Image (cartoon, rainbow, N blue to C red):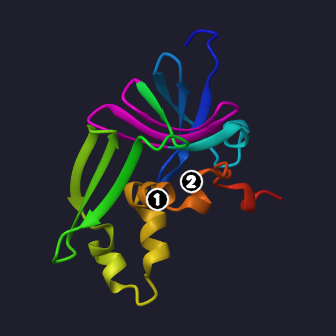
Amino acid sequence: MNSEPRVVLHYWGNAFRFVELQPASGHWRNRFALSSRNALDRLCCGFAVTRHFRLIAAYSCPDGRFLHLGGHRYSFASESLQIQCITNDAGTKYRFTAKWGDTVLMDHSYKAVRLKLLNRLDPTYDALDEESDDFYLWLARMASDPQRRNLPFPNAHASTRP
């Protein structure tokens, strides 16, 4: 990666995997650490996942908060950005949709995370657990909540540091 400014993101669901992103160009690469408490962890300003080799990320930087899809970034401050995650009638699948105005940026259907065996067996598994397990659900809820939409992303492991 060249000297273009970069952001470091936590890879959702993996404390040892990080993503280094250059927002202007959209170039990114995976980074791995031997410990979840490392220099990369302290630099993190958001979260990322990949789908079909395409980066999906939500992050904060001095310019604001952004959704990064593919090689483009979209401001959470804009009313043009619409994100939703809805369930089917049976509650077995979710459909995540991100739009910029009338343009569909991403449309992704997937099995509900709460249906995984261990989650079904856990009597305390609730909506907060589901949101922490499901990046797309978390992203949609965060983007649709006016109180959360413009807050900076907290460091995911800040509370675990001494």
The residue that mark 1 highlights is 144
Q: Is mark 1 on a helix, strand or loop?
A: helix
Question: x%, y% of residue 12?
Answer: 48, 50
Residue furthest right in the image: 162
Which label sits on residue 1?
none
Q: What element carries label 2?
A: helix
Residue at 66% across, 30% down: 63
Which label sits on residue 149?
2
Figure check: 105 above or below 70: below
The reply, left or right, for residue 89 in relation to residue 53 is left
Residue at 73% across, 55% down: 158
Q: Which of marks 2 and 1 is nearer the N terminus?
A: 1
- Which quarter of the rendered picture does the N terminus lie within? top right
Which residue occupies the foreground of this view, 71 or 111? 71
Q: Mark 2 Cα within 10 Å, few/some/many (few <14, many 20+)?
A: some
- Which quarter of the rendered picture does the C terminus lie within? bottom right
Find out whether the residues at labels 2 and 1 contact each other: C-beta distance under 8 Å: yes
Residue at 18% across, 70% down: 88
Q: Does the magenta stretch include residue 62?
A: yes
Residue furthest bottom in the image: 123
What kind of residue is marked 1?
Ser
The reply, left or right, for residue 48 in relation to residue 97 is right
Q: How far apart are marks 2 and 1 (CA)?
A: 7 Å
The reply, left or right, for residue 70 in relation to residue 60 is left
Question: x%, y% of residue 27?
Answer: 46, 19
What kind of residue is marked 2?
Arg
Residue numbers of the magenta segment: 48-71
Q: In which quarter of the image is residue 127?
A: bottom left
Q: How many badges with numbers are in the image?
A: 2
Question: x%, y% of residue 122?
Answer: 40, 85
